[in-house]
Image (spheres, coloured by chain):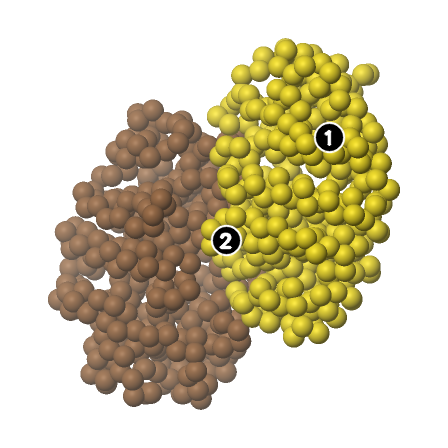
Chain colours: A brown, B yellow
């Protein structure tokens, strides 16, 4: 088992990475305030892992309520969130309960937000079962639900007490979702870790064929990057915004195509290609570095072109993104592989030209 | 203008108390991050104060969006909260916006929760316009909406940046609501401030006839008590729970009668009478002290008897209160006027007997 820590003072917490961890209920029992936990999961993950997880928790002396939600980004809304509240209230959970998110990013974000807001805040534990949630969304305390007018518009910062990434759960992950997770992995290399980027160039095929050691290394190095950034800037007032590389373009793709048509990681992948292209066209990133970045994304089986929505539609959708601050579009762009920066004064014409270049009709 | 401070480190904030403060837009302008604010109010307060407030804010260089909600506890729910989100999104408010709650406790609680959760948290300012919100709910960062299964079940701790209590706004407050606010005022005397209780015994008629100096003194001394408790225990893990004197009984009254039939302050008043009676019957509070407490509540024109729901119905409703921890009913009881304590092992029969004594059929 590999172990990392997110250093946030009294809100610090460990990230455990390894095989067979959901069978070790004591990992959870060691950190809860009372023996009462409530597992929130979805109807795809539940048949695979819920019974075994409940058994391991009960064997460790815990009492488990369970809430099973419908799967998918389309259900990341208030109605589904309310199903969590209803489940907790029906099970008479008080504020000493610990919620446990068993699933991917949607389950983690919604369970975290339920924990942030149930009876003004209860503890929660992340047990991510997708690569994307293991390397990214389960760490850092961002929780949210979508609003009809925008993704993740309603949310809170609420740190988990513990993250358990059981790499065995990746064995049942569809290839498309595995690749979507790799997009966020590549992101860490691009924004701050050139050695990791080099390592990924050498190991990307092993990642895709799910070599266990390579996967564990991938998750550990990704989480180490994420943990460092979160510890520096918990609520995204500075450096944490670098994690949004490709995300402003990507959110435009997700919103423009209708949520769920493109996976988040796929949209981020194309968005990172757009950000690299824009960085190069502005003369900020050397052309060969841009090509290396885009090539690795492509080798991971991820899109490097966006849908042909038209640059003006992209720009309109990007203007609605949460990263807009005081009316100015803020973009994460690249100086080099491993060196990212935030810009809020990029000429709109240049952004439009990069979008056109990356989104062939 | 009187000024107090809630000492919470980097989240400390001032409470300003005085006449004509909403005409002084610079008080708000001095604390906001950007000139963009959104005022949330209701359809009773808006015709009285909204235009004047907007004018003073605009004169201070601020841009104001406004959201006007239906009045009343019955609207303290997700649908109304969503109207706030919709208004903010329609006005293209980003996370640099500051929300301003202009109204009573319901507006303050909902606006605060919207601020806690809009784009993962934005700043907010409380401008309470009722006595209850000026002496209690606007201070301390408790925010919430109701759930069909319970009051304030969904919420967050989110401190305001500033509280402005303009005592002129109390001139339009109905008598019944003024008295409801006095219940929370008396509470501070009962739980921790015997000198304030003595002062209230001497000045209760002046409070009820709205003598401006006496009102200002009442608000300042109440806020000083609240601020001290919140600074000691922001998230209610200890001493802050004393503020719940009478509230567990009171919530049972509110829920049992249907929210809005009894005002919150009225239910708390009867609840405090029950708590004092129970304290006396258990031999923990001298009989004369109990009588003085109940007498002051009665002199304030507040109920000292609860509705005859029957003790078993009270107990069932109390068991659903948020203050239940790990299955044990926690009650705030009194040792004397100015000396409260939390008990979690009061025999149910004694609680039932006190309820019966205070709720004549």
Pointer 2: residues within 10 angstroms few (<14), some, or many (20+)? Answer: few
- Residue A108 point in image, percent of width and height: 40, 49
Dots 2, 1 in contact, CB < 8 A = no
> Left or right of A121: which side holds A17?
left
Quadrant of the image occupied by residue B177: top right
Whether residue A7 appears in this view of the structure is: yes
Residue A20 in the image, given as x and y percentages of width and height: 22, 39
- Secondary-structure class at tag 2: helix
Q: Which x, y percent locates residue A287? A: 23, 85
Residue at horizontal 78%, vertical 66%? B52
Q: Which of marks 2 and 1 is nearer the N terminus?
A: 2
Instruction: Report the side of B45 relative to A353 (left or right).
Output: right
Residue corresponding to mark 2:
B11
Judge by depth and name the residue closer to the eye, A11 or A115: A11
Q: Name which residue lies at 47% across and 51% down.
A: B9
Report the disc number at residue B198.
Answer: 1
User: Which chain is indicated by disc 1?
Assistant: B
Disc 1, SS: helix
**Residue for point 62% across, 39% down:** B225
Discs 2 and 1 share one subunit: yes
Q: Is residue B171 left or right of residue B5?
A: right
Asked whether residue A273 is in view, the answer is no
Q: Quadrant of the C terminus of chain B?
A: top right
| Protein chain holding label 2 | B
Label 1 neighbour load within 10 Å: few <14, some 14-19, many 20+: few
Hey, which quadrant is residue B31 in on the image? bottom right
- Mark 2 to mark 1 CA distance (whole Å): 33 Å
Instruction: Determine the residue positioned at 39% across, 31% down.
Output: A33
- Say above or below: B225 vs A336: above
Q: Nearer the viewer, mark 2 or mark 1?
A: 1
Residue A356: horizontal and vertical position, in percent?
A: 40, 85
Answer above or below: position of A146 versus A40.
below
């Amino acid at each position: 088992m590999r172990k990392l820590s997110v250093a946030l003072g009294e809100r610090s917490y460990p990230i455990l990475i390894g095989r067979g961890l959901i069978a070790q209920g004591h990992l959870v029992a060691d950190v809860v305030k009372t023996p009462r936990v409530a597992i929130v999961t979805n109807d795809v993950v539940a048949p695979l892992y819920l019974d075994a997880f409940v058994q391991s928790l009960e064997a460790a002396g815990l009492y488990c309520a369970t809430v099973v939600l419908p799967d998918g980004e389309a259900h990341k809304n208030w109605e589904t969130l309310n199903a969590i509240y209803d489940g907790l209230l029906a099970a008479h959970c008080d504020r000493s309960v610990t919620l446990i998110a068993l699933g991917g990013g949607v389950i983690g974000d919604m369970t975290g937000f339920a924990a942030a807001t149930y009876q003004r805040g209860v503890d929660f534990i992340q047990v991510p079962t997708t690569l994307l949630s293991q390397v990214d969304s389960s760490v850092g305390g961002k929780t949210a639900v979508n609003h009809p007018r925008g993704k993740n518009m309603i949310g809170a910062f609420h740190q988990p007490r513990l993250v358990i990434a059981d790499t065995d759960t990746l064995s049942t992950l569809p290839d498309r979702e595995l690749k979507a997770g790799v997009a966020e992995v590549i992101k860490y290399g691009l924004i701050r870790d050139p050695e990791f980027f080099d390592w990924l160039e050498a190991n990307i095929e092993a990642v895709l064929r799910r070599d266990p050691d390579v996967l564990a290394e991938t998750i550990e190095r990704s989480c180490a990057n994420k943990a460092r950034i979160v510890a520096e800037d918990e609520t995204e007032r500075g450096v944490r915004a670098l994690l949004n590389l490709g995300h402003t373009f990507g959110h435009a793709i997700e919103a423009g195509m209708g949520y769920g048509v493109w996976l988040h990681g796929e949209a981020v992948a194309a968005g990172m290609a757009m950000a690299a292209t824009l960085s190069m066209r502005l003369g900020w990133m050397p052309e060969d570095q841009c090509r290396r970045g885009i090539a690795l994304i492509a080798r991971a089986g991820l899109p490097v072109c966006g849908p042909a929505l038209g640059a003006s539609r992209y720009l309109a959708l990007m203007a609605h993104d949460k990263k807009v601050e005081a009316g100015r579009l803020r973009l994460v762009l690249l100086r080099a592989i491993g060196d990212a920066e935030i810009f809020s004064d990029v000429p709109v014409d240049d952004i439009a030209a990069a979008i056109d270049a990356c989104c062939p009709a």
